[in-house]
Image: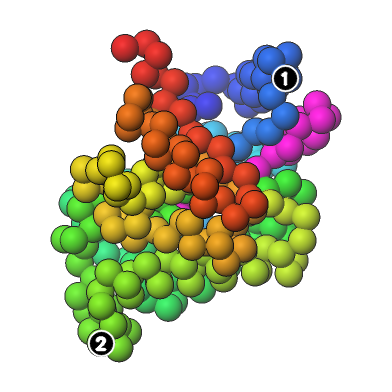
Amino acid sequence: LRSRGLGDVYKRQAVSDMLDRLQDANFNTVFFQVRLRGDVAYRSAIEPMSYVFSGKEGVSPGYDPLAYVIKECHQRGMECHAWFVTFPLGTDEFVRKLGKKSVVKRHPELCKKHKGEWYLDPGIPGTTDYILSLVREIVSNYDIDGIHFDYIRYPENAAKFNDASSYRKYGKRQNKADWRRDNMTRCVRTMYRAVKAAKPWVKVSSSPVGKFSDLSRYPSYNWNAYSAVHQDAQGWLREGIQDMLFPMMYFRGNHFYPFAIDWKENDYGRPVVPGLGIYLSLI
C-alpha cells in the first residue's frame, strides 16, 4: 500500500481487509515486500524505512509494517514470507532522496551504476556480507515463515554491467560468465545456510527468470536465467540451497508450457511454482 495521505489506522485496516479477502479465497501464503530499493518495511538498524508507509523516506509510520502483517497473517492461519529485493538500489533521484542513509553513499565500494540505475555488485565479496547482515536482521527479529529473494541475479543487459574492475580483482582468470554464475550461487548458498542455521523451519526461495535456458526445440530468444542474467537456478535446486522456486513465467503457449515442463523435470524434489502474469488474461 502506497501512502496517499491516509491515516495509519486506515492503512492497517486496508491490509487486514486485503488479508480477509485472500483468506476467503483460500490463500494460505502471503509474500510481503520487506526490502524495496535499498529501503525497507521494518525497523532496521541498517537501511531506512520506505516512504510507502509514512510518505517520507526514513520516517517511521508509528508502527512496524512487517510485524503487523506477520501478526495478521498468523491470526488467519496464513504463512508470511518476507519478499526481499536483493541487488537493485534505484535511480539517482531515488538515491538522493535516501541521502546519506543510502547504501550507495555508505558503501560506494559495493555499488555500480547500470542503465541509469544503481545495483550492488555481486562480484565483490563484501556485497554478500552486506546482504547477509540484512537477512540476519529480518530472520532474527521477526517470526517469518519464509524469505523470498527477488532480483537475485545480474541486471538486464548484463553484458554491459560495469564489473570489469571486480572481475580483474576477483575473477582469477575464470570465464566471466561462469564467474558471475558462481558469484550468484555463492550469495544464494550463503543466505540459505545462514537462514537455516538461525531458524531451520524458515523456507528459502527465489524468483528466477522464467526460462532457465534454451531447450532443444524452443529457444529462449536470449532471455533466460542461466546465460542472460547468470542464475544457475536448477543448480541451486540440485545443491539443495533452495526450498522452492517461483520462476517468473509471464508467458503464453509455447513460451510457457515447454519451459514449465523443463523446471518440473529438473526440480530435484523441490516445489517449483510458476509465477503467472495474470495481466495476460486481460489482453
| Earlier residue among tags 1 and 2 | 1
Disc 1 residue crowd, few under 14, some 14–19, many 20+, Cα 10 Å: few
Apparent side of residue 242 relative to residue 260 in the rendered image (left or right): right
Residue 62 is covered by the magenta coloring: no
Apparent side of residue 3 relative to residue 124 in the rendered image (left or right): right
From the top left corner, tell me how far across and down residue 44 is, in percent: 60, 56
**Residue 25, quarter of the rendered image:** top right
Residue highlighted by disc 2? 173
Apparent side of residue 258 relative to residue 146 in the rendered image (left or right): left
Residue drawn at point x = 47 percent, y = 39 percent: 261
Residue highlighted by disc 1? 26
Amino acid type, mark 2: Arg
Residue sitting farthest toward the front: 217
Q: Which residues are magenta?
A: 70-86
Q: In the figure, 228 relative to 93: above or below?
A: below
From the top left corner, tell me how far across and down residue 20 is, in percent: 72, 17
**Residue 6, quarter of the rendered image:** top right
